[in-house]
Amino acid sequence: MPFPTDEDRDRPWLMRTYAGHSSAQASNALYRRNLSKGQTGLSVAFDLPTQTGYDPDAELARGEVGKVGVPVSHVGDVRALFDEIPMEQMNTSMTINAPAMYMLALYLTVAEEHGADFAKLSGTTQNDIIKEYLSRGTYVFPPAPSLRLITDMIAYTVRNVPKWNPINVCSYHLQEAGATPVQEVAFALCTAIAVLDSVRDSGQVPDDQFAAVVARISFFVNAGVRFVEEMCKLRAFGQLWDEITLERYGVQDAKARRFRYGVQVNSLGLTEAQPENNVYRILLEMLAVTMSKDARARAVQLPAWNEALGLPRAWDQQWSLRMQQVLAFESDLLEYDDLFEGSTVVEAKVEAIKQGARAEIDTILGMGGAVAAVESGYLKSALVSSLALRRRRMESGEDVVVGVNKYTETEPNPLQGSEDGGILSVDPDVEDAAKRAVVAWREGRNAADVDEAMTGLRDAAKTDANLMEASLACARVGVTVGEWAGVLREVFGEYRPPTGVAGASGGGHEGELTSVQQRVRALGEQLGRPLKFLVGKPGLDGHSNGAEQIAVRARDAGFEVVYSGIRLTPSQIVSAAVEEDVDVVGLSVLSGSHLSVVPDVVRGLRDEGLTDVPVIVGGIIPDRDAERLRADGVARVFTPKDFEITDMLSAIVDAIEEARA
């Protein structure tokens, strides 16, 4: 066989870094800097208020503005975000779900101002609301109207923006929430089936154009460190997608049936302990989605080594980009055909995943499909149970995590020795600036035009009309994200899905819990009632996995657990603590808003006279912030390095006893 030449090399994947923070202007500067370093696509990270349809001055936005992404409220922000960026030439991925239609409307409005041809615009809106109900938590509307918004976007883009991916079916967060490879494949494919069925049944796309709909469905997956299994998972994904689109939807064009996916490797699998090891984890996980040509990602965005500590700096993102470039341009990976064709080991693993996924798909479709399985709580409970089992394997040492539960001896990390502690801190003035800016924006608009556009959106939402045109009309006159979402909240209502805690299995740890159970029982007998533990998620952070695992284990330890899900204001948490007469309040915050929302809860409890109810906090919290929280009255602070939940519960009982004493 002749050696491959440069002409034989496969084209590299799109290289992205998931980026955005502080303001549209600051993020624009970051994007242009990253593009100058060889990044070939943009991946926009939006802050939590934007993701959940709130403006910066909303009550729930307190402490969240600009923390995990860029705040975008209106067309002016999008103008600033894409200033001097050629939109026709750029492939832009936007990680946005519930307000995806409005973010696309804002993007198209600015592209129109740039003189761009819609037919040449390429990119992706994530727009997968099913996984938001299960794992990520940035849902707004109930399932039926959410599916309608997705359907309308698909119908509009197929006609008007044909190179745009209107949905990115996202299994990424399912794995982080506990999904096994079989569950990840099955749950994501059932989401895709629900979406395609909705588009087909809406009648908005003629039968002879339905293949174009299938061709624009993309996927966004997670790749964990078990990179051989992950590579097999992606091969199974592709083969099942081809099978479903041919057999269920009759798509004859093999190119339209191609499994098209992008990836970010497993961010929540990165460790706070010995974070330098994360570089190797990221590399191994990237190999899972690049080594196999027949299942190679179309786009790759890598986290940075320090994402378990906080927000990465520009240098940290550059390091991750260079990792992609070394693999693509220095190695010989892209010179060969598929390396695993004919491997009996790979074929057997792929077949096992496919068989398991087919059985799970049949179960979900037998319930009525993905939406029905969300509403019944089946999918959420399955994920909570799977994650409980995964945590038990880690706690027992069956699953080794280097630096966390084995080989924990370490030298000081020089990467964290700088004045910034190895992470980027968002200026606290960013939030106040964003609040002032959105107020000024509203005052500078033509009020009559805004009222007319919002009335048009409200009226259209009450019919079965496609809502893209009404959303574009809102974008052009300066309606904000919060106003757009507010109109649809009026019409569609809001949704709080099942938490999955009640139906979840705790994972088999009863023997190890005995001492904690005895202490909980004894303290409860002293009080004359079971101990009550309120688990709260203040603010807009939707990463509820940790809170759910604490709730499940606390229930098994004998606590009466009060957990109503995510997205609560501090005052709501305080009211619940008073009403339920709880003995401890546990707050989970992973978005960086802990210095804003946690002290509000502590003060609220004191104002209500609950000085003997300790507050504990868990999340991604730097040491200097943990010291401030303790000074503000927080009894215990836990971070990702505190992975033994039973030990945490013992410390929580200590805190209750100290407060009672």
Image: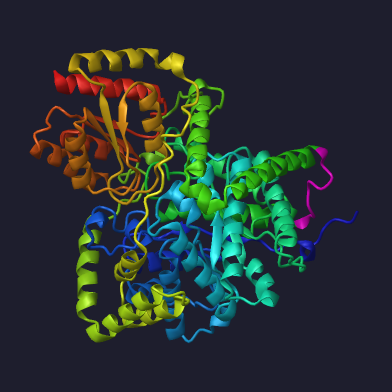
Where is residue 477, by image quadrant? bottom left
Name the residue: 46% across, 33% down.
Answer: 504
The relative height of residue 618 versus residue 291 in the rendered view (above or below) is above
Provide the major secondary structure of the magenta segment.
Answer: loop
Residue at 42% across, 56% down: 314
**Snapshot quadrant of residue 282:** top right
For image coordinates 66% across by 72% down, the residue present is 210
Q: Specify the segment rendered in magenta.
A: 335-344
Q: Is residue 123 magenta?
A: no
Q: Where is residue 160 in the image (x, y as percent from the top left)?
A: 55, 81
Report the number of discs.
0
Q: Does the magenta stretch include residue 340?
A: yes
Residue lying furthest right in this view? Answer: 1
Q: Quadrant of residue 543?
A: top left
384 w.r.t. 131: above or below: above
**The C terminus: image quadrant:** top left
Instruction: Specify whether residue 90 is in view.
Output: yes
**Is residue 93 in view?**
no
Q: In this view, does 365 lie above or below 182?
A: below
Q: Position of residue 234 (x, y in %)?
A: 67, 49
- Expressed as whole percent of the image width and height from the top left, the position of residue 224 reads 58, 41
Image-based side of 539 in relation to 162, left or right: left
Report whether 446 appears left or right of 80: left
